[in-house]
Structure formats: structure tokens, C-alpha cells
């Protein structure tokens, strides 16, 4: 448990808007709040170090500590809202387990907090079971059989409360002639009376307090009947007589609601947002999009570690003053020896920039990497964290707020939904991502991006910021007032609207500096219906830590085809002139100027740069060209008028070509040898609308900016470009 931690309801705001800050503190002493501007978030003593600037704000002060709890795991809850009485009940559900190593996983539970009665249909360690807890006594009927993982079954359980007779029926859903049954006696001799406080929960037991017995897997068509006699098929499309409730998960796939198609309209709500738009028992591959055949996608995948909105209460709010400087900020929380930094970003008033330069903060990428637990975390990096006074917590050790889209659920499926309404541990000043030979500071994302922020500060280049989330809301209008727009080191994830904002800016004559690698790569979805969460489907190719299942390539949140933007007809080369080509360990190399760089259109950017080789030092990977590399490719939309001014060389043997570039183990999409595609191209091109684009095609490029107190060839090159683009 982290003793002091918090988050804001949104990652960014503009003057006149308010942010709510939610804090959990285990101390019995108050905590102090101070707004700080984040100039550098790199704790490396060989670099600029941590640089924060305290800022006057009305929210600064002292607040009482209180602990705010949160329980992981997704499930559905259905209030019954009226008293009912049952002499008999039948529970039925289609089930596809993804994890069996649990003592109990609830499928359907009916409970009454007024009386403490709980009836559960569940998967226990020894097989499907029906459990009745009533009047201080718990009885169980179990079918001693082990289902197979990732296979669909039909499960029904019936009980006569007047006699205690109970029966379980378990069938392979695709071989329904194979039937296993067990009958028995439970301790009950009178009708089940449920008060108006009663509720049904699906995929967990949550009658009172924290939910437990969370299910890992897929459920479809949960139903309740008020009798034994449910007809030949309790899962019939036309709901049989005697139905008490029948939930159809094919309805409202893009929402957090479940619909009851039975006679009583017992609709429910999903908690912690499980995965929808997944294949169900009837899917046979005839249709790949859930919008076209929702009946084939009538399943929901629940996980015991799903996390949507922590729903903590606000401890304090901060209304951004009208004259507040745009930039990167954090709420510094201090209580005893504990310190936390809750990040937030302030944009200028829409349409009224306060600088000619705008840095786009890749908040969608921050969210998709949020709480990324890495395989290589261990004692060595923990020692460095202590030596450098770095942020002391890591999601590989503290996983109570779930992990990132680069991690797996406990059942082995990939995490496809990521929330920003939770503490994001790796979005903290001073956080270290990795430790490896020649890795430099070992920073990624937020902390690595601060190399750019501190460089702008050092050069006296005033800048505003805008977040991806604000691009989603405001489109190109958020960027058009600026003479130049800069990306950060890894703007990998984008919605259609945020990508449109960048494209609209360059189409209307804006000057873009793409200062990262592997950018504009994955398509994600967000939704006003379910705020606070983003979705990824890792389809087809691409560098990825898990793969979407066949038939599940369409996002649930917006119904659109997911995966790579390249597979959606919008490769990054169209926007930036370069696109992802190769990846290796966090070990960078250098660039060499090309003959083209000496032409009249390009030589100005190298004024003050001596020699042809540059970028062979850096705080990220010890070189400006590293980790993920982008290259020029006219076959994917790189403009023909682009000038390649420099190319990287001599990458380590650990570098490999991106999977989408390979056709066989030796042939590539371009026909070039694989080794020729392992490079980063720095390019420049003019756009037809009168603007220009400068792209560096490397994640570690900005890590070279602070070297030698910001006086080096990479710094001079970028300064020449930014000053010309911005008129500074």
C-alpha cells in the first residue's frame, strides 16, 4: 500500500476550468499541498536533476488525511428494487472460463443484505457449484468435473426451496448432447423471501461491502427462472415462460449498461468496465465486426483486476486562474516522510495562445502505459532509486490500481481498457522506468519528455501545452493559433480526432516538429458514454505484448476497426514523413549527415553543428538514435519532396525490424535487406499549404538535448529549427 497517493479527475484543464484532486493518506496527520511547475523530472545526478518551481495557488495549504479505498475487479450489479418471494428458482448462464486456479468464482449471485441470504451459481476449484447461505448455514451442491479453459459451457442450477431438492446440469455448449448432472439436497424448507434491498450480481459476489469471488472469463445470457420447468432450452432466443430475468449482453455493447429482455426489466450496471465486443458462444467467424452481428458478440469478458474509476471523493479543487501560465504542473503532497506528485497540464485559453510554440503532451500514451509493470524490475533498479532519491514506488510492486495495456490480466488475456481516473504511479516526477547497460537515466514517457521541457526552458523558448485529451475535444482549433507545434518523445496512441487535429494543423500551414519515435502508431477509442477510459485492440501486426483474438479487432467503445493506424489506411508517414521501422534495447547510436543536408533548403538547420557525425551521447540510451526508430518510406506516404538530412548508423545487434515490415524471415515489404531498415531518418519537408515538417524518428533523440549543459550538436540542430519555425 502506498501511504500517500492521489489523482485528478482529468489530466488537463484550461483557465476558468476546475480540477478535482482525490487523495488517500493513511496518516493521522494532515498533509500539505503545494502547486509546482515541472521543469525537469529526471533524477539522474549527471543530468539537470529534478527541477520544480513552486507556484502560488489558492489550493495551496493543509488538508486532513483520510484513507480512500478501492477494489479491483469487474462485475455487473442489478438492483431488484422490490420484494419478491420464490418457491423455486433456476439460474442459467453460458460460461467460458479463462482461469481455474481460484477457490471460488461467482457467476450469478442473488443476495439480500437485510437477511444475509445469498444464492450463488459458481465455479469452485472442484467444479461447478450451487451454494446457499441462509440463517447462518451454508450448503453446497457441486458437480465434480473440471471444465477446460477457453471453452464454452451451458450451466443451469435449479432449487426447490420448499423441499431442498437441487440439481446442476453442465453441458459443452457446442456438443449439447454431452450432459453432466448432479442432484442433491440443500437445507431449506420454506420459500425464499427477498426484500426490496436485494440485488443480483454477475461475475462477483457483492451483497454487502467489498466484492469477492470475482470471475475471470466470459459470460453470456445469464437468466433466472421462477420455476424448475424452463422448457427444452433455457437459453432460447424467445424467452420461455416463467422467466424472472434474462440479460442480453449483445445490447448496448458500447456502454456500461446491461439490458434485461425478460418481463420485469431488471436492467443493470457494469462496475470497473469489463471487456465487451468479444466473441460469444455462437461466433463461427462469419462476421468480424460486432456491429454487424451483435448476437455473435453477446458475451462479456470479466477480470478480477479490471479498473475503471476509483470514484474517490474530492479532497480539494483547483480552479485554474485566468492568468495562469500554460505548462506542466503537479500537486505536491507531503505528509511526514511521504511525498507524492499528482500531475496535471494547463493549456492556454482556447484560441488565445500565450506563446508561438505549443508542445502536445501525449496523455493518451501516458494512459495506455499507465502503471506499466515491467519484467526487468528488481533489486538493481531499486538500489538506483535509493541512490538517486527517485520516486520510491513501482507498479510491479504496487499493483493495487491495476496495470497497463502492456500487461496481462491474471487469466492471460491482454489489458485492453486503461483508465486515467486512478493513480498512475509511473506518471510521477523522478520515476525510473528501467536499468540496463548504457541506458542513461532509464526514463520513458513523462520523465523523458521533461528533457524537452527543460531544454525549452534553458533556451528561453516560451511554450504553451495542449494534451491529447484536449485535441479530442477541440480538434485542430487547439493547434491552429500556434506557429509551431512540437511533439514529445513517444506520441504513440491516438484517436481519430486527435490524429485529425495534427493532420488538420499541417494541412492548414502549421509547422510541425515530430521529436520522437514510433509515433501515431496505434489507434485507440474513447467514449463520452463511458468517460475516463481508453481502449486498444492489438490487431494483426505491430510490436505488441499480446494479440487481440480473432474476430475481436473492432473497439467496443466506438465500434471502429482498431489496431495500427497503418492498417487503417493512415500510416504515420503521411503526417510526419517517417514511420516505425525497427526496435532494440535501450541503447542508442549516432547520426551522420547526408549529402542532401548541404543543399540550400537544409543547410541552415546545421549552422553551428561541426562535422558530419552527431548525437553520440545522451541521457536516454547514451545516443540520440535509439530504442524505437522511424524511417522515410514513400510507399507508405512519405512526401517525395522530403529531404533526408541525417541517418543513424551502427545500431546494436539487439535491434530488429518491426513485424509489419517483414513478409518472410528474410524478405521485407520494400524488398530491401532487413538490416537496411534498421535506421532512423531525420527529415525535413515543406507542405503544400506553406508550412513545414521536421521529424527525427527516434525515441531517445530528446535525451541528448541536456548534455553538456544543453550545449551540443543535437541541441543546436533543434534550436535552429524551432527558432525558424516559431519566429523566436
Image (tube, helix red, strand yellow):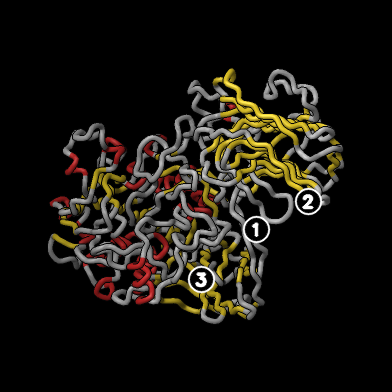
Q: What residue do we see at 26% from left, 36% from top?
A: 662
Q: For the residues marked 3 and 1, what is the alpha-carbon distance in whole angstroms?
A: 19 Å
Of the 4 image quadrants, the one containing the N terminus is bottom right
- Of callouts 2 and 1, the N-terminal one: 2
- Of callouts 3 and 1, the N-terminal one: 1
Q: Are marks 2 and 1 in contact (CB under 8 Å)?
A: no
Quarter of image, res 539 = top left
Residue 481 visible to an observer of this rendering: no
Return the residue at label 3. Answer: 341
Q: Position of residue 440 (x, y in %)?
A: 28, 67
- Of callouts 3 and 2, the N-terminal one: 2
The residue closer to the viewer here, 400 or 41, is 400
Disc 3 secondary structure class: strand
Mark 2: give few (<14), some (14-19) or many (20+) Cα within 10 Å.
few
Q: For the residues marked 2 and 1, what is the alpha-carbon distance in whole angstroms?
A: 33 Å
Return the residue at label 1. Answer: 311
Q: Are marks 3 and 2 in contact (CB under 8 Å)?
A: no
Disc 1 secondary structure class: loop
Whether residue 691 sits left or right of residue 111 in the image: it is left
The residue closer to the viewer here, 456 or 428, is 428
Residue 400 visible to an observer of this rendering: yes
Q: What residue do we see at 48% from left, 67% from top?
A: 327
Nearer mark to the viewer, of 3 and 1 = 1
Q: Are marks 3 and 1 in contact (CB under 8 Å)?
A: no
Whether residue 273 sits left or right of residue 641 in the image: it is right
Return the residue at label 2. Answer: 136
Of the 4 image quadrants, the one containing the C terminus is bottom left
Q: Position of residue 688 (x, y in %)?
A: 34, 43
Q: What residue do we see at 74% from left, 32% from top?
A: 166
Q: Position of residue 143 (x, y in %)?
A: 62, 33
Amino acid at each position: 500500500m502506498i501511504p500517500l497517493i492521489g489523482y485528478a479527475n482529468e489530466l488537463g484543464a484550461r483557465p476558468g476550468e476546475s480540477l478535482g484532486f482525490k487523495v488517500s493518506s493513511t496518516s493521522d496527520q494532515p498533509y500539505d499541498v503545494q502547486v509546482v511547475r515541472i521543469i525537469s523530472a529526471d533524477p539522474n545526478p549527471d543530468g539537470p536533476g529534478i527541477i520544480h518551481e513552486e507556484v502560488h495557488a489558492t489550493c495551496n495549504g493543509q488538508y486532513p488525511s483520510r484513507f480512500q479505498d478501492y477494489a479491483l475487479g469487474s462485475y455487473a450489479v442489478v438492483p431488484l428494487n422490490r420484494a419478491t418471494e420464490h418457491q423455486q428458482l433456476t439460474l442459467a448462464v453460458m460460461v467460458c472460463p479463462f482461469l481455474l486456479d481460484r477457490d471460488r468464482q461467482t457467476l450469478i449471485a442473488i443476495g439480500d443484505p437485510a437477511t444475509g441470504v445469498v444464492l450463488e451459481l459458481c465455479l469452485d476449484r472442484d467444479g461447478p457449484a450451487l451454494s446457499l447461505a441462509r440463517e447462518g448455514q451454508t450448503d453446497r451442491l457441486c458437480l465434480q468435473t473440471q471444465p477446460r479453459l477457453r471453452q464454452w459451457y451451458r450451466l443451469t442450477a435449479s432449487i426447490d426451496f420448499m423441499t431442498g431438492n437441487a440439481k446442476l446440469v453442465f453441458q459443452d455448449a457446442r456438443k449439447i448432447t454431452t450432459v453432466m448432472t448432479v442432484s442433491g439436497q440443500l437445507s431449506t424448507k420454506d420459500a425464499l423471501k427477498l426484500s426490496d434491498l436485494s440485488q443480483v450480481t454477475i461475475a462477483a459476489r457483492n451483497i454487502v461491502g467489498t466484492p469477492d469471488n470475482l470471475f475471470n472469463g466470459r459470460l453470456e445470457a445469464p437468466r433466472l427462472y421462477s420455476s424448475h420447468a424452463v422448457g427444452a432450452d433455457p437459453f432460447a432466443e424467445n424467452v420461455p415462460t416463467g422467466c424472472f430475468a434474462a440479460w442480453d449482453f449483445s445490447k448496448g455493447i458500447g456502454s456500461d449498461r446491461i439490458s434485461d429482455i425478460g418481463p420485469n426489466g431488471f436492467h443493470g450496471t457494469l462496475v470497473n468496465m469489463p471487456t465487451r465486443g468479444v466473441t460469444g458462444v455462437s461466433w463461427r467467424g462469419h462476421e468480424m465486426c460486432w456491429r454487424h452481428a451483435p448476437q455473435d458478440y453477446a458475451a462479456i469478458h470479466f477480470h478480477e483486476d479490471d479498473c475503471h474509476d476509483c470514484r474517490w471523493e474530492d479532497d480539494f479543487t483547483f480552479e485554474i486562474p485566468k492568468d495562469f501560465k500554460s505548462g506542466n504542473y503537479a500537486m505536491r503532497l507531503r505528509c511526514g516522510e511521504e511525498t507524492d506528485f499528482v500531475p496535471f497540464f494547463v493549456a492556454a485559453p482556447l484560441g488565445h495562445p500565450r506563446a508561438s510554440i505549443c508542445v502536445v503532451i501525449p496523455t493518451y500514451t501516458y494512459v495506455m502505459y499507465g502503471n506499466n509493470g515491467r519484467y526487468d524490475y528488481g533489486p538493481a533498479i531499486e538500489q538506483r532509486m535509493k541512490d538517486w532519491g527517485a520516486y520510491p514506488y513501482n507498479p510491479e510492486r504496487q499493483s493495487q490500481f491495476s496495470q497497463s495495456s502492456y500487461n496481462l490480466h491474471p487469466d492471460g488475456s491482454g489489458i485492453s481498457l486503461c483508465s486515467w481516473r486512478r493513480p498512475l504511479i509511473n506518471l510521477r516526477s523522478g520515476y525510473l522506468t528501467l536499468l540496463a547497460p548504457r541506458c542513461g537515466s532509464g526514463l520513458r514517457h513523462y520523465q523523458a519528455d521533461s528533457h524537452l521541457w527543460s531544454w525549452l526552458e534553458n533556451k528561453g523558448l516560451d511554450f504553451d501545452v495542449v494534451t491529447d485529451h484536449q485535441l479530442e475535444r477541440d480538434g485542430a482549433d487547439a493547434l491552429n493559433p500556434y506557429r509551431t507545434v512540437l511533439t514529445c518523445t513517444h506520441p504513440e496512441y491516438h484517436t481519430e480526432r486527435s490524429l485529425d487535429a495534427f493532420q488538420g494543423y499541417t494541412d492548414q500551414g502549421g509547422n510541425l516538429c515530430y521529436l520522437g519515435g514510433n509515433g501515431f502508431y496505434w489507434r485507440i477509442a474513447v467514449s463520452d458514454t463511458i468517460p475516463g477510459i481508453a481502449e486498444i485492440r492489438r490487431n494483426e501486426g505491430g510490436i505488441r505484448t499480446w494479440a487481440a483474438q480473432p474476430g475481436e479487432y473492432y473497439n467496443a467503445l466506438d465500434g471502429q476497426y482498431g489496431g495500427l493506424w497503418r492498417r487503417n489506411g493512415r500510416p504515420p508517414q503521411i503526417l510526419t514523413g517517417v514511420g516505425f521501422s525497427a526496435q532494440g534495447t535501450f541503447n542508442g547510436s549516432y547520426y551522420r549527415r547526408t549529402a542532401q543536408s548541404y543543399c540550400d533548403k537544409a543547410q541552415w538547420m546545421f549552422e553551428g553543428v561541426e562535422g558530419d557525425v552527431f548525437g553520440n551521447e545522451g541521457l536516454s540510451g547514451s545516443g540520440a538514435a535509439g530504442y524505437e526508430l522511424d524511417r522515410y518510406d514513400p510507399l507508405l506516404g512519405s512526401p517525395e519532396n522530403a529531404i533526408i538530412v541525417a541517418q543513424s548508423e551502427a545500431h546494436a545487434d539487439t535491434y530488429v525490424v518491426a513485424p509489419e515490415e517483414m513478409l518472410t524471415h528474410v524478405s521485407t515489404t520494400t524488398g530491401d535487406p532487413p538490416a537496411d531498415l534498421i535506421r532512423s531518418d531525420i527529415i525535413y519537408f515543406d507542405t503544400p499549404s506553406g508550412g513545414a515538417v521536421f521529424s527525427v524518428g527516434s525515441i531517445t533523440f530528446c535525451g541528448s538535448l541536456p548534455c553538456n549543459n544543453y550545449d551540443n550538436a543535437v541541441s543546436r540542430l533543434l534550436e535552429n529549427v524551432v527558432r525558424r519555425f516559431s519566429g523566436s
